[in-house]
Amino acid sequence: MRYNERELLSLARQPAEKAAEILMRVPKKGSVLKKRLVKLVVNFLFYFRTDEAEPIGALLLEHCRITKEEENVFSISFIEEPERKYCFECDSEEQCQEWIEALKRASYEFMRRSLIFYRNEIQKMTGKVSPLESCCQVVPGGFGQEQGLVLS
Amino acid sequence: MKLNERSLAFYATCDSPADNTGFLYKRGERHTAYHRRWFVLKGNMLFYFEERESREPVGVIVLEGCTVELCDSAEEFAFAIRFGGTKSRTYVLAAESQAAMESWVKSLSRASFDYMRLVVRELEKQLEEMRWGPAAGCGGCWQSPGSWKPKPLGPERSPERLPALPAVLPKENGCAVWNNAPGADQPPDTSSCGGHDGEGNPRPPPLPPRRRASSSEAGGTRAAVAESPSTFCRLHEQYGREVARLRQDWLEKRRGLRL
């Protein structure tokens, strides 16, 4: 699949939501835990060799599952291949939990659900649609359209 | 750089709803011929397929940090996706109608994760202000009523929210008129939402009037909340009735305006 690598590399250099040196193992036969610089930027998780400026790889964090494994360890897998796990071993349980929380929130789809939630809450309180959310994709297919008021 | 391509392809083709789909002509990189491709926009990823029925995308454009502009091109209904940086490629696309072009430019302008995040935070702030007044977000014991997964950031986690904002302001993403800073002017095409003041800035929804909890004096409302969940429920109900009345008034007024 072709992709705009230059822009993705540029994204990898942006300020991160979260970054740390973590032991990581990719779901390949015979692969072992290796120390990587792991960096969360928008809905991408980049991973670098610790002394290199360019990432080895990137994971798009949509439709993924973040699972707590054993102590200090969490994994990322994707819906269509749940057994293929990227494993991460943190320095502490606390760090592990922080990463799990951050990664669970790091998808566009998660934010879309948040937006729908807040919109509904505001609508419940006032009967009005916030003018703010008419200017973004809330429910796909509803872009640019007014979200109809529920007139009961 | 490796990318989880299989997962990307799955994301592109699975039945999760797309923000926009349609045929667009894409200008080639080296040769200026246009190729008709089936485009699928999901979040900040623009996938393109050889055919509508293709099982795998030919490619994807990561849209984070892009700007979308109309294009001076011999091709009708053309627009461009541009990135900052000296060697960045510009993607020139052409729609098949004026309406399609406008729809694509609009949805692509709003497609960044950063922008979505700003909007969500702004709504979250609005909701808190509505519930607890303009000083909301600093009370300690507010619990989000009702269950909702995933858990929203409540006030007890508000100290985390600020550091999570990118240190660099989000890049301009969209047509020149867009300003992605929170609380900025409305984009030009928000139409009849109502609630705008003279300058076109949104008027905040009416705050429920402050009520005194029956057993405490002014300012005791928050202390009352901190005391027990039943006090919260009572207040929630009181505010709820007030809000329902306000809503009824507003609805009637609106119906009156329509006639």
Image (cartoon, helix red, strand yellow):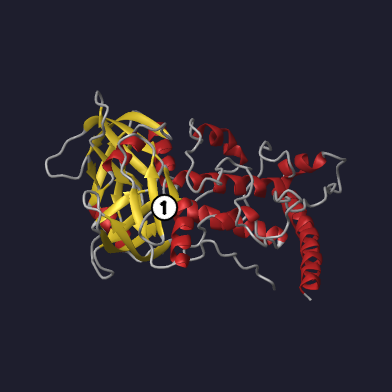
Q: Chain of mark 1?
A: B
Q: Quadrant of residue A135?
A: bottom right
Q: A27 or B190, which is in the foreground?
A: B190
Q: Is residue B95 above or below residue B7?
A: below
Q: Viewed as shown, does residue B252 lie left or right of B116?
A: right
At label 1, the amino acid type is Cys
Query: Residue B55: x percent and y percent?
Result: 23, 66
- The structure residue drawn at horizontal position 50% and vertical position 46%, both measured from the top left corner, is B115
- The structure residue drawn at horizontal position 41% and vertical position 54%, both measured from the top left corner, is B43
Q: Quadrant of the C terminus of chain A?
A: bottom right
Q: Extreme bottom residue here?
A: B259
Q: Quadrant of residue B36?
A: bottom left
Q: B122 or B169, which is in the foreground?
A: B169
Q: Extreme left residue here?
A: A30
Query: Residue A74: x percent and y percent?
Result: 32, 41
Q: Viewed as shown, does residue B179 lie left or right of A25?
A: right
Per the image, the residue denoted by label 1 is B71
Would you say residue B71 is visible in this rendering?
yes
Q: B250 or B95, which is in the foreground?
A: B95
10 Å neighbourhood of mark 1: few (<14), some, or many (≥20)? some
Query: Residue B188: x percent and y percent?
Result: 61, 53
SS for dot 1 = loop
Would you say residue B147 is visible in this rendering?
no
Q: Is residue B168 above or below residue A58?
A: above
Q: Viewed as shown, does residue B109 lie left or right of B136?
A: left
- The structure residue drawn at horizontal position 51% and vertical position 65%, both measured from the top left corner, is A142
Q: Is residue A85 above or below residue B9?
A: above
Total marks placed: 1
Q: Quadrant of residue B242?
A: bottom right
- The structure residue drawn at horizontal position 70% and vertical position 51%, both measured from the top left corner, is B202
Query: Residue B33: x percent and y percent?
Result: 24, 58
